[in-house]
Image: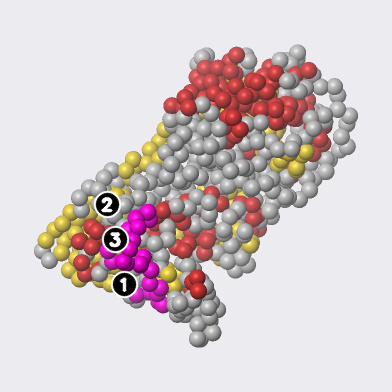
Amino acid sequence: MVIAGRVAAPLSPRAWGLRRGLAAGLLAAVAACAPPAAPPRQPDAPPASTPAAPAPAAPASMEVDPAAEARIAADVAYLASPELAGRGTGEPGADLAAEFIARRFAELKLSPLGGPGSDAKAYRQVFDARVGADVAPAALAVQRAGRKQSVEAGKLVTADGSASGTVSGAAVLVGHGVTAPALSWDDYAGRDIEGKIAIVLDGVPTLDGGPGGAAQAGAPGGAATADPHHHAPRPADALRDFGSVRYKLRTAREHKAAGVILVAAGDELPRVSDDAASMGIPAVVITRSAARALFPAAGLAPPAKPADAKPAAAKPAAVKPAATKAAAPKPLGGTTVEITTKVTARMAPASNVIGLLPARDGSPHAGEYVVVGAHYDHLGYGGTSFSRAPGVHAVHPGADDNASGTAMLLEVARRFASLPERPARNLLFIAFGAEELGTIGSRHFVDHPPAPLAAMKPVVAMINADMVGRMRDGKLLVDGLGTSPDWKAIVDDAARGLGLTLQFGVEGFGASDHASFTASRVPIAFLFTGVHEDYHRPSDTADKINAAGVSRCSVLAARMALALSGRDARLAFTDAPADPHRSMRGGFRASLGTMPDYAYQGPGVKLTGVRPDAPASRAGMQAGDVIVRIGAHAVTNIHDFMFALGDLEPGREVEIEVDRGGTRVPLKVIPAPGR
């Protein structure tokens, strides 16, 4: 399951090191991001438009089969095996998984509907996905007092979010590079740094007193106390969310700096980022020792000791001094700097694997399709902002996410392949690729459907399975029932005799591939057994999968698909009532109800959809709009978008500018409260 696309923002569970601020936010957004700790409580699903008819006797292949558990367990074991190494997009393991699924489709005698040819490759719809970045060694040269110094390798790296380019200018120390008017803090105040190189310190200041009130020196535990001027108190760590590297680059860009040099707290450099999305400004990170040697006039403190270093017995650990207000930017007279960086997006082929069970000859609905889907990719060896084990280079098996859904998909396909008679509508089984990068595979399918699907118009419904391997007490969430008034009766009939405790949701959008179909106005149903501690960790292993639970899910999904295939009329699509808060699970104060398109490579943030009856839709925002500005902030990519969301206040109107077919359209939006 994707959490928020490929990035994150200043929110929660994935923050770490220099990237802590942004890495947690996309988690919360998107996309890409974290599923709820338990199936979310939502409005009651809409009633069926017509009374449910008595369920006809199901074919034998639509009943619980004790042998299915072993098949499912074996499929999960292979997909989550060390051989497939986490099925990361663009990695050999993902290709092996796609081959495995294609062979299974061929064994079931499903027709290929992916690409040309007659072998297993014909089941694969190939597309390109951005999987990372190739980062050339950065260069930094400093000219001072007629002498030119270059920083040697090992003492600098390209910063996360750096643009490519060569820039030069006078050096200006701008403290921690934070501009936070609401907290009366601005490291750039009183100094025009346009065209200059901003030297920015790692981390954020600790506050003590000053405008707005703050924790006073000596207050126990840094507790907030009111200042003598009776301003509202603020905690000493009030600036903690302003420490991410990408936030500092965005702030420097908005102050029109030419480039940024980030000074690490110590002499350990961060890992070079694999995210090619830039903040629009070249930037490097250098060690504290190198910075002290290059910029003696800056008066930088010595490097901080590693966290595990023990202070000398005679000297207590130093306490970071608190600050009352930001120091003025400090030009380093006579010092000019040149920075060179090169970051190139790395693309890799990925594929959806598509198998077709054709409708029976002569059926009046032979031109229509029911889709059953699940994504097969996962995180590979981790090491990205998606992993919840940051810094750990280890296989993330993804047994539940989403080997479990893939195994369910294969089991449903097997059950349909053994029917004595083909269904009245075509059944399309799709294993999506690149879901973890932002539902890229399903977006590609929807935007470029195989020719028979005629721009998705013949698709009557989509059933998606993502993380169905940890069923507890028979509980299963079936979400998306608000996308058609007929879903509830179909699901209730399909669940008879399965011993499931169903929880219903109406939301059509969400953090998985069904959202791509909802955006194309296809009724969807989403099966999900809940999140757990192993989610996006190396510990999501096959031995923890409840194969019996997956088997029951497969029977439910197969019966639902069979009912859909035999209906006289196709399901009517409805815009589901939405809780806009669900688009921003995490720490944002305000929510818009937008659904970003993470496959979009251009400037700005393109919307794949807008939640109905949410602030964005009420303001007139539409699918296909590209957000280019929120308030005073330019939006160049998803990172900018997240930071701008963090600045919004519920109920306070903001102007959002979108590019709609080449025309800039300003819209007035009143954000809703977030979570």
Q: Callout 1: helix, strand or loop?
A: loop
Where residue 332 sits in the image (x, y, percent)?
Answer: 23, 69
> Which element type, helix, strand or loop, lies under badge 2?
strand
Q: Nearer the viewer, mark 2 or mark 3?
A: 3
Q: Which residue is mark 3?
A: 303
Marks 2/3: CA–CA distance: 15 Å
Q: Quick check: 396 above or below 330?
A: above
Secondary structure category for the residue under label 3: loop
62 vs 318, nearest the viewer: 318
Residues under labels 3 and 1: Cα distance?
A: 21 Å
Looking at the image, which residue is at 18% across and 54% down?
150
Which amino acid type corresponds to the residue marked 2 in the rendered image?
Leu
Q: Nearer the viewer, residue 651 or 59?
A: 59
Residue beneath disc 1: 329
Is residue 423 rendered magenta in the image?
A: no
Residue 220 - label: none
Q: Is residue 344 above or below residue 123?
A: below
Q: Residue 1: x percent and y percent?
A: 58, 39
Residue 216 in view, yes or no: yes
Determine if residue 458 is in view. Answer: no
CA gap, disc 2 to disc 1? 23 Å
> 636 above or below 519?
below
Q: Residues within 10 Å of mark 1 (few under 14, many from 20)?
A: many
Amino acid on which disc 1 is placed: Pro
The residue pinned by badge 2 equals 156
Task: Choose between 206 and 146: the one closer to the eye.
Answer: 206
